[in-house]
Amino acid sequence: MQPGMIQEAEMVSTELLRRYPFFAGLNDKQLRELAMITEELEIQEGETLFEGESGANFLYLLQDGSVNLHYVVIDERGMELPQDFMVGVINPREVFGISTLIKPFEYTASAIVNKSGSVLQIDGPKLRALCEEDKDMYILLLERIASTALLRLRDTRMQLVV
């Protein structure tokens, strides 16, 4: 299956979105607009949801299962084979694919399903268009994404120390 491709997608309810702390503070209108560009989908162990350095077309929230984030380092001199590092684990209720709202809108890591489950997949270009129209939503989501990015950076640094 292609990264970001889904089977049997369903649009979600605002009530489902309301359960996620990531969306706390959004009003009913904003949640309705998000629900219209969000799909719920099943993910299978071993599936790649997206690859590093590819266009960030979706923002994800994990409902259940587990997703590993991998970063591939390529020796520009060609002296060594690419090295793959697992840099994080996404657990239920966590957001990932956060590059969807950060220019240049490219994923910085690959997301590989570790344990089958389900995700909410938000259409990135449509989300960016909503944010262009609603700066309050944009600010709130960027604050949450910045917080998530800083936590992941801290966790990655801790892995490097060990």
Image (cartoon, helix red, strand yellow):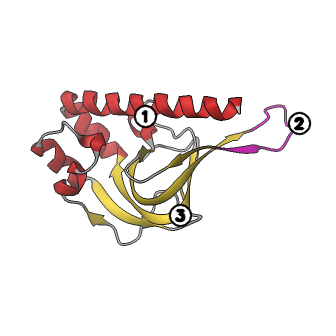
Residue position marked by numbered label 1 in the rendering: 148
Frontmost residue, 139 versus 4: 139
In the rendered view, tell whether residue 36 sits above or below residue 144.
below
Toward which corner of the image does residue 154 lie, by quadrant?
top right
Between marks 1 and 2 in the image, the one whose residue lies nearer the viewer: 1
Q: Is residue 50 visible?
A: no
Residue position marked by numbered label 3 in the rendering: 115
Residue position marked by numbered label 2 in the rendering: 79
At mark 2, the secondary structure is: loop
**Label 2 vs label 3: CA separation?**
34 Å
Q: Main secondary structure of the magenta part?
A: loop
Residue type at numbered disc 1:
Thr
User: Is residue 110 rendered to the left or right of residue 33?
Assistant: right
- Disc 3 and disc 1 in contact, CB within 8 angstroms: no
Identify which residue is drawn at 85% across, 37% down.
Answer: 78
Identify which residue is drawn at 69% across, 32% down.
Answer: 160
Identify which residue is drawn at 40% across, 29% down.
Answer: 147
Of labels 2 and 3, earlier in sequence is 2
Q: Position of residue 131 (x, y in %)?
A: 25, 34
Say few, some or many: other residues with alpha carbon within 10 Å of mark 3 (under 14 / 14 to 19 / 20 or more): some
Toward which corner of the image does residue 127 lie, by quadrant?
top left
User: Is residue 33 rendered to the left or right of residue 160?
Assistant: left
Of labels 3 and 1, earlier in sequence is 3
- Disc 1 and disc 2 in contact, CB within 8 angstroms: no
Say few, some or many: other residues with alpha carbon within 10 Å of mark 2 (under 14 / 14 to 19 / 20 or more): few
Toward which corner of the image does residue 162 lie, by quadrant?
top right
Q: Position of residue 104 (x, y in %)?
A: 47, 31
Magenta stretch, residue numbers? 74-86
